[in-house]
Image (cartoon, rainbow, N blue to C red):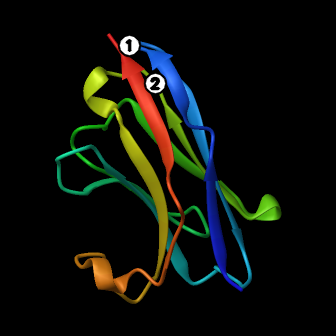
Amino acid sequence: QVQLVESGGGLVQAGGSLRLSCAASGRTFSRYAMTWFRQAPGKEREFVAEISWSGGSTYYGDSVKGRFTISSDNAKNTVYLQMSSLKPEDTAVYYCAARPTYTSGSYYYEYDYWGQGTQVTVSS
């Protein structure tokens, strides 16, 4: 069974840092892009960051550029999202997802697997 399991969420003060983890299992993800999305209450899902499993390419949403860093550790089958300079507007449920690299990343249906999400709350 393929699983993506997020962890590391919690409560942090504005300006603080937090690292999220996405543990992948059940298949080889070498030909997948690993992506972080987030969704705040009453708001649409938002793209946060993406990395190829090889780590050769990374992409970030405009709202997090310069503050968040995505990385991967293939030996641990884990993708990370290091979040710094956190703002209250970063408060959301953060989801890990995976799509084949031949897809465009433009559509949610391209993502084959999703984690259960982890809550991040940034207080002011």
Q: Nearer the viewer, mark 2 or mark 1?
A: 1
What is the quadrant of the N terminus in the image? bottom right
Q: Residue at x 27, y 43 (%)?
A: 40
Above-or-below relation of 51 to 21: below
Q: Residue at x 42, y 28 (%)?
A: 121
Task: Look at mark 2 in the image and give the residue it sits on.
Answer: 84
Q: Residue at x 48, y 15 (%)?
A: 16
- Residue 7 in the image, given as x and y percentages of width and height: 64, 46
Q: Earlier in the sequence, mark 2 or mark 1?
A: 1
Q: Quadrant of residue 74?
A: bottom right
Q: Is residue 104 visible?
A: no
- Residue 51 in the image, given as x and y percentages of width and height: 49, 61
Q: Is residue 103 left or right of residue 106?
A: right
Q: Residues within 10 Å of mark 2 (few under 14, many from 20)?
A: some
Mark-to-mark CA distance, 2 and 1: 9 Å
Q: Is residue 120 left or right of residue 43?
A: right
Identity, as a three-letter code, of the amino acid under mark 1: Ala
Q: Is residue 70 visible?
A: yes
| Residue 14: mark in rendering | 1
- Residue 4 in the image, given as x and y percentages of width and height: 62, 67
Front one among 95 and 81:
95
